[in-house]
Image (cartoon, rainbow, N blue to C red):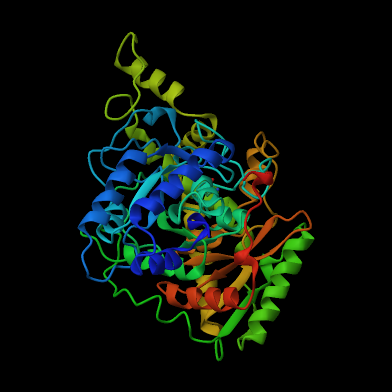
Amino acid sequence: MDLHSLTIHELHELLSRREVSAAEVVTAYLRRIDQIDPAVQSYLAVMAEQAMENAGRFDSARGDSSLSLLDAIPLAIKDVICTKGVRTTCGSRILEGFVPPYDGTVVEQLQKAGAIFLGKTNMDEFAMGSSTENSAYSATRNPWDLERVPGGSSGGSAAAVAADLCAGSLGTDTGGSIRQPASFCGVVGLKPTYGRVSRFGLVAFASSLDQIGPITKDVEDAAILLQAIAGHDLRDSTSVEAPVPDYRSSLKEPLNGLRLGIPKEYFIEGMHPDVASAVQRAIVTCRELGAEIIDVSLPHTGYGVAAYYIIAPAEASSNLARYDGVKYGMRVSGSRDLLSMYSQSRSRGFGPEVKRRIMLGTYVLSAGYYDAYYKKASQVRTLIRQDFLDAFEKCDALLAPVAPNPAFKIGEKADDPLQMYLSDVLTLPASLAGIPGISVPCGFTGKNLPIGLQILGPHFREDVILRVAYQFEQATEYHKARAPLNGLP
Ligand code: GLN
């Protein structure tokens, strides 16, 4: 049996029964990273030494007490989350060589739970993108077809899970960046409710939208990771002081009596026919599992892309003002004066997509345009949120596709930002509304590319979407398929 293909809960069983040591598990992963990652390019930094040290320490210190679920479990972290002493680049040149002096709260929580970090994963620069092609360092490949993108912006985290290069990972989702790469790579990705997980130590992109969440091989693992990172944090005033339920305990409850809404606006024209039919089949499966299926409408869905691509760049332009060549990372030397040092550091440090967002963002916030763009977009956001609140009066969760199309070819949309933005049409509304969403594998296209089912729930009802996802997953076989990696060993 290959250790690297196991889920977190399966690995936990083996470790608990002492059938494997932490050192064996970590060695297996590091060996596989050496073999496979040159082709996939999911990692920006591999923490081999540190991981082996931690594994050794765990093995020698472990007594007779029982293990926690994450003890000695090898995980990967998106490179937008600060790791003390380990370079954190956000996929950007401007943070090349930046080494954070502290850990993000989620990193601390996972460490406390016993997890071992294998490395930092590739991403679109500052999480802006849907394909991981905007990374300044490399383009991560989709393990199901190495000619295709893994999705983005958490493409490295999703590809690493799909290629068995870690047992699970953390991503971030501002407008779909956990759910969409999870769906493109055939793994599970959960975006928690805004406020559920602390963002202390997360490099900010759009502060009213950003959330950290798990990407895993199955739904139970997503529940395990969410359990470890959810909760209030004094260091993040946007994290909410609501009790954290036991996510794993509700997974096993059948779907009987649950009402699942099908939002008609999510079945858009031009959608890939295999995506449409896989999601339709998933709906039938949920009905057979005992759920009641009802039609609902989210009438303002069509305005999501426009509202998001005003709000997110506006916030980004303000958040990215701090990269001036003085405080963090890269500084261009030899400038005449302070202002030209700022502008040269920023011109060379940021890539084209980030610059586009800064220009868009400063434009929509500028005097004279603020009311027409930023304020209007914020009003539309309220309407989108209200659509969801109305729908959740009628149903417990929503079922929809994650993206209209499966993973596209590397380069296919790279020169056309609008096409790239439009591909986010089905993930942006939930982000604007702050509600939780999960992507769970629900089929394959004729070309054997994974398709994801998106399940959306009311604020702080991660338990409901996890339960629906789990019941669906257990009734199907899609999560068991392994990525072919174009025939690599
Ligand atoms: N694709 C979206 C964007 O480019 C969402 C990214 C994200 O969720 N981080 O902004």
Residue at 46% of width from left, 71% of height from top?
A: 220
Q: Is residue 367 visible?
A: no
Point out the residue furthest to the bottom here: 257
**Residue 185 x %, y %:** 60, 54
Query: Residue 27: horizontal and vertical position, in percent?
Result: 41, 47
* In the image: residue 459, left or right of residue 38: left
The answer to which of 312 and 291 lies nearer the viewer is: 291
Taking the view exactly as shown, the residue that stands out farthest to the front is 19
**Res 425 quadrant in image:** bottom right
22 vs 410, left or right, is left
Residue 38, percent across and down?
A: 55, 35
Residue at 34%, 13% in the rendered image:
333
Q: Residue at x 40, y 56 (%)?
A: 212
Among the 4 quarters of the image, the one containing residue 208: bottom left
Residue 18 percent location from the top left of the image: 34, 65
Q: Residue at x 67, y 77 (%)?
A: 283
Q: 64 or 452: nearer the eye? A: 64
| Residue 470 vertical position relative to residue 153 in the rendered view, above or below | below
Q: Closest to the observer: 381 or 108?
A: 108
Left-right relation of 56 to 152: left
